[in-house]
Structure formats: structure tokens, C-alpha cells
Amino acid sequence: MNVEEREILAFCAVAIVGGGTAGLSLATELRHLGVGDVVVIERETEAGGVPRHCGHYPFGLREYGRLMKGPDYARRNVAEAQEAGVRVLTGTAVTGLHPGGVLDLSGNAGSARLSALRVVLCTGVREASRAQRFLGGDRPPGVVATGTLQDMVYLKGLRPFDRPVILGSELVSLSAIMTCRHLGITPLAMIEEEERLIARPLFRPFPALMGVRLHTGVRDLRIHGRDRVEAVSFFDRYGGAVSLETDGVIVSGRFRPEAALISDSHLERDPGTGGPVVDQFGRCSDPSYFAAGNLLRAAETSGWCWREGVDTARRIVADIARYGVQPATNAPLPIQFSHPALRFVVPQGIAPGGSQGAMVQMQLGLERPFSGRLVARSAGKVLWSGRLSGAPVRRVLAPLAPILHARLSAPVDLALE
Ligand SMILES: Cc1cc2nc3c(=O)[nH]c(=O)nc-3n(C[C@H](O)[C@H](O)[C@H](O)COP(=O)(O)OP(=O)(O)OC[C@H]3O[C@@H](n4cnc5c(N)ncnc54)[C@H](O)[C@@H]3O)c2cc1C
């Protein structure tokens, strides 16, 4: 059925798809700024997003001035939204996006259609599955992603294994160590294919401090077992064959935006981030739609996503004040690059006529470690140049203001030199 054939059942000012960290802070800020009818649509039975499943610290320091466990932080975000007058629809999935801010909803009560002046996509991320990571060997039960593990441990009170290994070494992999400690167990090892721990250098001592042996630079990782995980094997960085007896594997990190809705929609998707293409205001290729949170680029901390929600709310209020019901249709000029070390840039384009309230930094994703200069040019003229160093998965930022303040007539070319 297409949009014309189905009745539009409800209207609201702003509809937010996803009641996680970004969606809730965004909705709360919209209400504080006086937006009348703000609806958050959440497919789970409770809103709160990923932190609901993370029964450990550290959450909330920048947002609420104190260290909180994930579930307390999620509850606080929901309470703030509800106190501000946000309508939170739980147990309701958005199943379709249509031009002009029209959504298909599906829940226990059946299906419906909602039309909004602006829609914000805040659907977050998911971890790469075992298949997406091309792990070799057998396919026994007992291989879980960190998010699934946290759901089992903190929400369902299960103990899926006693001596697991963790694949991956991102921040979320360290969070998997904390989840195991909650069960009173210490993982046997943390195993990483990259040459170094991926989490920031500050966290390098963490696995050792927790008694977890770290193997980096491993090759040919395989899982063994028939009815349950029995072992993992790999070649270590020196080429030695290693086999570890284990009863579970936590596959952590290598996040991907939860972008199934976008793939099936009219919105443009960026192959680099896997999320939607946005301009400096977080506006998608259909200007009735915005995006915020980890959907933009997997994956940042909760504090970052919370702030992004607040900033995006302010941009939406300005957008509605400026354009009203009919949003801007000015096509952005793309920010483009061809260097193989660059995987993505957010925003992907610059819409004419705007720096006020816009993002102040570009977020860059690296394909491999890089140290050198980043140069931004347009029509051959250098707009900005500065030092850049970073590695894959890490936060890499560069100023956006020099690009926003230039009178652009051609795409922006990014070069790594
Ligand atoms: C396993 C894991 C552990 C983490 N640990 C930490 C930590 O210790 N500290 C920290 O600061 N950060 C941590 N993070 C990161 C942090 O939780 C996220 O950065 C933050 O929650 C992202 O907010 P978000 O709103 O973008 O997405 P989320 O919080 O993931 O929320 C997205 C929401 O969208 C909903 N949704 C998706 N699709 C639909 C749909 N079609 N219809 C309706 N609803 C939909 C989902 O159900 C979900 O509730 C962790 C992340 C993960 C995955």
C-alpha cells in the first residue's frame, strides 16, 4: 500500500523514531523550547535505549552531574521526557518512512500512520554479527553480542557461561568485562585482530587491571564446539598457534547503524557511515527528516549522543520557525574525499545559507591509522588545513566553521596529506 491509499490517522509537530539516549534528550529539549506535540516511538516495551541493558557505570556525569548506572540513567532520561510533556509510545515499531514526514507504525494494537512536521531518526546501532565479522569454525550456541549478553544478565538474570572470551577491544568490549564481573567471573582473554587495543590509549591498562589477558594482532580466529562452545583457536601476532578452552564467546563492537528503515526508504544513505546522509543541521535528503545519535555514525558514548539530541532539537526549532510546514529544499553541496584512509565524514554535505546553530565539528571515520594533515578545499581554494591523527573506531574531529563561513559554490574536497 502506498501513502495515498492509506488514511493518515494522527498528526504531531515532531515525531522521534527511537526512545534511546538521543531520542529522549531531543524530545525533552523540544518541549522545553515550547514545541507543542512531541511523540517518541519506541519498539521495545520500555523506552531508554541501550543504557537500559548496561547495569554498570559510567553514565550521566556530564548530563546530570553524577555517575549513574545505565538503567538509572535510562529511567532518568524517560522521566525527564515525560515530565516535560513528551508522549512516549512504547511497544510500537516504525516500519516505513514516506516523503514529507509520514510514518507507518506497528504495535500490539495494530498498525497506524502518523504524519509530523518533522521526523527525527534516532534508531541507534547494532553490533556486527558473527557472520558479518567472517569468523571461521563451527557454529555452536554460546556466541553472543555484548548487547545481548547485557540483556541476558541485567534484565533476565541469566548466567550464560562461566569462562568466556571476548572478541574485540573497543570501549564496549571493556563494558563486556564489567558485565562478566557482575556475574562474578573474569573472562579468559580479550582477542583483537588489530595490532593494538582499539579503545582509547587511556584504557590500555584496563584488561590487565581486570585480570584479562589481551591478545592483539591475531589471525585466523575460529570457534570450536558442537552443542556448545568448547574452544577458540587463532594465530597470535608472532604466528604461534593458540587454542583456549572456553564455554562462551562475546562478539563485541564493530557497530553498524540500525539503518534498516532507511535502506527501505526514499532517504539517501551514506555507504561510509551506513547511516543517513545529513547536512550541517542533521537534516536528511528529505528535509522533513533529521537524524541524531549513533545512527549518524556508529558509535559514540551516551554523553555525546545525549548532547547531540539537545543540539538537534534546537536546530529543528529554528528550522520550523524559518520554513514552517514546508521545509527547505536547498540541495547541499557534498563534502567528498578519495583518500583510502578515510571511511566517512559527518556531515556529508553543506546546505547553502547556514552556520547559525549548525554542527561545529566534522566527525571523521578512519579506515586505518593516519597521522598527517587534513586539507579542506573548495574550487581549488584552501578553506582549512590542520594536523590530524587518529585510528579506526576512535573519535576524530575537525573544525567545520571555516567551511560553513566560506561562500561555497562547489563541493568541498577533503585531502589527507
Ligand atoms: C552494548 C553497548 C554497551 C554500551 N556501554 C556504554 C557505556 O558503558 N557508557 C556509555 O557512555 N555508552 C555506552 N554505550 C553507548 C551508548 O549506550 C549509546 O551511545 C547511546 O545509548 C546511543 O544513543 P542512541 O539514542 O543513538 O541509541 P540507543 O540508545 O541505542 O536507542 C535507539 C532506540 O531506537 C529504538 N529503535 C530502533 N529502531 C526502531 C524502530 N524501527 N521503531 C521504533 N524504535 C526503534 C531501539 O529499540 C532503541 O531503544 C554502549 C552501547 C552498546 C551497544
Image: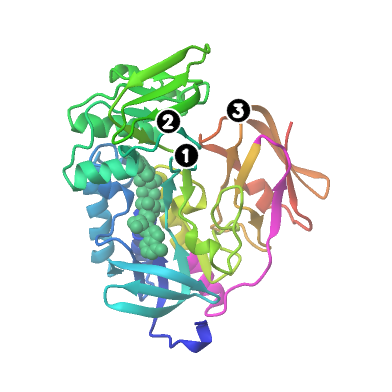
Q: Are marks 2 and 1 in contact (CB under 8 Å)?
A: yes
Q: Viewer-nearest of labels 3 and 2?
A: 2
User: As shown in the figure, which amino acid type bears the numbered disc 2?
Assistant: Gly
The verdict on residue 79 being magenta is no
Residue identifier under label 3: 369
Which range of residues does the magenta coloring cover?
A: 315-341
Instruction: Judge whether 221 appears above or below 311 on screen.
Output: above
Instruction: Judge whether 361 appears above or below 33 on screen.
Output: above
Q: Are marks 3 and 1 in contact (CB under 8 Å)?
A: no
Q: Is mark 3 within 8 Å of ligand 1?
A: no
Q: Which mark is residue 168?
A: 2
Query: Measured from the top left, where is residue 291 in percent x and y?
Result: 49, 60
Query: Measured from the top left, where is residue 227 in percent x and y?
Result: 29, 36
Distance between the alpha carbons at the discs numbered 2 and 1: 8 Å
Instruction: Judge whether 352 appears above or below 175 on screen.
Output: below
Query: Measured from the top left, where is residue 272 in percent x and y?
Result: 61, 47
The verdict on residue 317 being magenta is yes
Residue identifier under label 1: 254
Q: Residue at x 58, y 65 (%)?
A: 267
Query: Measured from the top left, where is residue 38 in percent x and y?
Result: 36, 71
- On the rendered image, what quadrant is the C terminus found in? top right
Q: Residue at x 75, y 54 (%)?
A: 411
Query: Please, which residue is most extreme toward the front here?
Result: 226
User: As shown in the figure, which amino acid type bears the numbered disc 1?
Assistant: Arg
Number of numbered tags placed on the structure image? 3
Q: Earlier in the sequence, mark 3 or mark 2?
A: 2
Q: Earlier in the sequence, mark 2 or mark 1?
A: 2
Dot 1 alpha-carbon crowd within 10 angstroms: few under 14, some 14 to 19, many 20 or more: some
The colouring scheme, among rainbow, by chain, secondary structure or one colour, is: rainbow
User: As shown in the figure, which amino acid type bears the numbered disc 3?
Assistant: Pro
